[in-house]
């Protein structure tokens, strides 16, 4: 039995179903495909963006874009529910970005700190152009980093879990996006 202080003790409220997520990802692929090529490096921000990046790169493949893949492991939350206001780099890009277009992929845009840091790092590594794409764009009351070039879903200002979004590392694997507040 789950302890009441356990991060999984509340019942999540489904906000976006697995089928709706798949539809949004397919639409994003249709919008992104014309502005990238097969030499583009799709770079996921770990760990939350992994679910979205896997789905989006497969959706891009279905529309004829076969991007290269890489990852950048950044952290601004740890196991907290709000950003610590700084970015830690746990693992850098593995692939050369020199002279390539880069598409940075992440699960959610709230403060924008991680996305801005990823763009800075990609440019520093020689990317000729850096585009950004997030699955969910949350409202945020304070000024933040530049807006992503692409986003799939305008999320509510709630604590979200599922589809890569987590609560202290738990509930990332839910197939739906849920609120846990």
Image: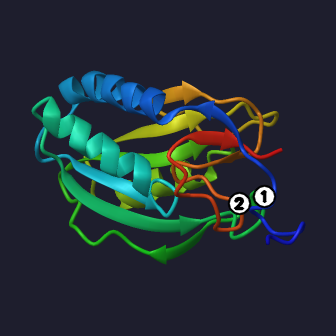
Task: From the viewer's side, name the closer residue of 121 and 104.
Answer: 104
For residue 125, say whether it is visible.
no
For residue 135, say whether it is visible.
yes
Task: Please rate how many residues cluster around mark 1, counting C-alpha atoms within 10 Å: few if below 14, some from 14 to 19, many from 20.
Answer: few
- Indicate the quadrant where residue 142 lies: top right
Q: Which mark is residue 128?
A: none
> Is 42 on the left or on the right of 123, as rendered?
left
Marked residue nearer the N-terminal end (1 or 2) = 1
On-image quarter of the C terminus: top right
Question: Which residue is label 1 attached to?
Answer: 81
Percent position of residue 70, x then y:
28, 62
Give the secondary structure at mark 1: loop
Percent position of residue 171, x then y:
62, 59
The residue lying at 74 percent from left, 62 percent from top is 8
Percent position of residue 152, x then y:
47, 28
Would you say the residues marked 1 and 2 are in contact, meaning their CB atoms lie under 8 Å apart?
yes
Taking the view exactly as shown, the residue that stands out farthest to the bottom is 90
- Say which of marks 1 and 2 sits in front: 2
Number of numbered discs on residues: 2
> Is 108 on the left or on the right of 156, as rendered?
left
On-image quarter of the N terminus: bottom right
The residue lying at 33 percent from left, 55 percent from top is 43
Taking the view exactly as shown, the residue that stands out farthest to the front is 1
Task: From the viewer's side, name the closer residue of 162 and 148.
Answer: 162
**Image: 41 above or below 35:** below
Q: Which mark is residue 167?
A: 2
Disc 1 to disc 2, C-alpha distance: 7 Å
- Indicate the quadrant where residue 170 lies: bottom right
Task: From the viewer's side, name the closer residue of 58 and 72.
Answer: 58
- Indicate the quadrant where residue 168 lies: bottom right
> Is 21 on the left or on the right of 170, as rendered?
left
């Amino acid at each position: 039995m789950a302890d009441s202080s356990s991060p999984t003790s509340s019942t999540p409220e489904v906000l976006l179903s697995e089928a709706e997520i798949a539809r949004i990802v397919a639409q994003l692929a249709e919008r992104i495909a014309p502005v990238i090529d097969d030499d583009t490096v799709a770079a996921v921000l770990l760990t939350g963006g992994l679910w979205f990046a896997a789905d989006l790169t497969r959706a891009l493949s279905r529309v004829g874009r076969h991007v290269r893949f890489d990852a950048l492991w950044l952290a601004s939350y740890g196991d907290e529910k709000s950003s610590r206001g700084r970015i830690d780099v746990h693992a850098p890009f593995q692939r050369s970005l020199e002279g390539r277009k880069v598409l940075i992929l992440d699960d959610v845009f709230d403060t924008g700190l991680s996305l801005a840091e990823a763009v800075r790092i990609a440019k520093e590594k020689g990317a000729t152009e850096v585009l950004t794409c997030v699955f969910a764009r949350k409202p945020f009351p304070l000024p933040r980093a530049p807006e992503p070039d692409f986003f799939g879903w305008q999320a509510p200002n709630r604590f979200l879990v599922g589809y890569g979004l987590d609560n202290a590392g738990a509930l990332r694997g839910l197939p739906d996006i849920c609120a846990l507040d």
